[in-house]
Amino acid sequence: MQRPWHGNGPQTTIDTDRGDIIWEPIAPMDRPLDVGWLKPRKMERKELGEVRDAFVKASERSIEAGFEIIEIHMAH
């Protein structure tokens, strides 16, 4: 997706011409967000576990750093 200051929409050649690198999107399903968006690669079950484990490790690091509140964005 585009950087917020460029519209937050799907990336296009305008973005790559500017020098942005389009990452390979991955998701639990292989359906694009909407028309014009890149089709993500469907994650393997193992990868879902890796993402879960990364969230756990990140929360542990934030507690060690002294944070008292952790907010996780889970809308997508």
Image (cartoon, grey):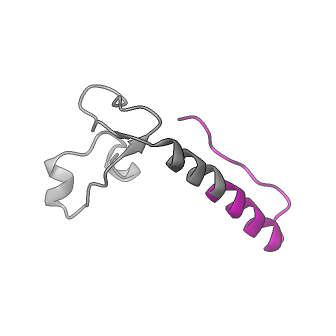
The residue positioned 36% from the left and 52% from the top of the image is: 3
Residue lying furthest top: 35
From the viewer's perspective, is 16 left or right of 28? left
> Quadrant location of residue 16?
bottom left
Give the x, y percent position of residue 14.
16, 51
Q: Is residue 57 within the magenta segment? A: yes
Observer-nearest residue: 4 or 63? 63
Specify the quadrant of the image occupied by residue 65: bottom right
Left or right side of 49 for 18? left
At horizontal 71% and vertical 56% (from top left) the residue drawn is 56
Q: Is residue 21 or residue 55 the one in the foreground?
A: 55
Can you say whether 76 is above or below 65 in the image?
above
Q: Residue at x 53, y 35 (%)?
A: 76
Q: x, y percentage for residue 68?
A: 86, 60
Q: Is residue 27 above or below residue 31?
A: below
Does residue 39 belong to the magenta stretch? no
Q: Which residues are magenta?
A: 54-76
Taking the view exactly as shown, the residue that stands out farthest to the bottom is: 65
Q: How far across and down, in percent of the image, does residue 48 sit?
A: 55, 45
> In this picture, is 46 found above or below 9?
below
